[in-house]
Amino acid sequence: MRVHDDPAQWAILTRDLRREYAAPRGRPPLVALDGVNIAVPRGELFGLLGPNGAGKSTLIKILTTLLLPTSGQAWVLGYDVARQHRQLRPFINMVSGGETSGYGLLTVEENLWMFAQFHGMPSRLARQRIREMASRLGLLQRLGTKVSKLSTGLRQKMNIIRGFLTEPEVLFLDEPTLGLDVNAAREVRAFVREWMQARGGRTVLLTTHYMHEAEELCHRVAIIHRGRIIALDTPENLKRRVQGGALFRLRLQTTRPWDATTLEALPGVHRARLQVGPADARLDLHLDDDAVLPPVLEVLTRQGARLLSLEKRAPTLEDVFVHLVGEDLTPTAAGGGS
């Protein structure tokens, strides 16, 4: 991005975007965004990754005209989000994971039809699109069901249809597969890809906690941490940042709790991350080279862990994230998994 770029050339453009929130008296303001610069061309599926509190939701609220920046500028489709929000809103839409939208006493179809009317969509066209999208997402048989009777996953599918229904030029997807089971999340990702490919120029900004989702869908990914963009590139280029050394994934059976960070004190161990499940544990290791593995296995044996499987693997976006931020991004909630 160049400072003199014409905002109309981009789907999304921000320059030195900053947002502060007031703090209790005597304390400095909370900085949610600190000089964010991004440029998203039309037709790109752009990913935004970051831990809770990194600034993702604040950025989306500004870009969707729901929140004003403290300083800096932002444009969507060439419209200034602070000064031209009325002109911009007909061309954008947003879907947030876990949101409770819709009127419970109305059916799925009635809710979606009413939303389409708010956007001035002809009734016949609205009903046609509702049925097409509901069929694609496995919700056709539920169109006559009251929203209050829907499960969390089905309600989220309705929200996704609502987001795509008006054919926005720029769509903001904030954790869209949160709360969905594996198959439903896969359906949503396929639907997003098909929608992007059906007509050139459609743009999506996606936030997600699921690294495989970003790898599968996004042309480019920005990693945001403490209000700043700390990396922005294609998934492949980002993964090249951690290609030095050897990456292993171990599945373990352990008889007693232990701290994986003790492994990081061993020579040649860059990172050790342990996830304990009900039946076994997963240990991800980033080592200098293969020769470091035997001493690690000796320590595991002394700690009462039994090796069930061992896999040497290629870097993932999750490795990039941990390398840059120093913490995992994997959410504790179920759903959206690979």
Image: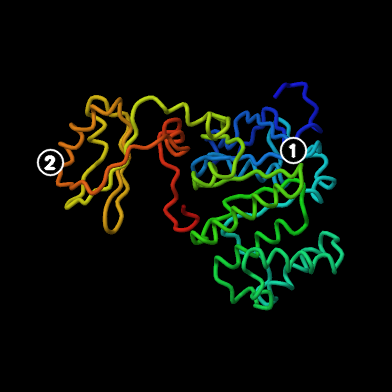
Q: Secondary structure at mark 1?
A: loop
Q: CA distance from mark 2 to mark 1?
A: 56 Å
Q: Is residue 22 left or right of residue 264?
A: right
Q: Answer above or below: position of 57 versus 294.
A: below
Residue that appears at 23% across and 27% down: 291
Q: Quadrant of residue 85?
A: top right
| Depth order, front residue of 92/213 | 213
Looking at the rendered structure, which numbered label has been put on residue 302? Answer: 2
Looking at the rendered structure, which numbered label has been put on residue 248? Answer: none
| Depth order, front residue of 300/189 | 189
Q: Is residue 22 left or right of residue 293?
A: right
| Residue assigned mark 1 | 42
Q: Amino acid at mark 2?
A: Arg
Q: Is residue 82 left or right of residue 160?
A: right
Q: Position of residue 256 (x, y in %)?
A: 17, 51
Residue that appears at 71% across and 43% down: 203
Q: Secondary structure at mark 2?
A: helix
Q: Answer above or below: position of 147 versus 189.
A: below
Q: Residues within 10 Å of mark 1 (few under 14, many from 20)?
A: some
Q: Could you tell me how many numbered marks the image carries?
A: 2
Q: Position of residue 295 (x, y in %)?
A: 18, 31
Q: Amino acid at mark 1?
A: Arg
Q: Position of residue 148 (x, y in %)?
A: 61, 75
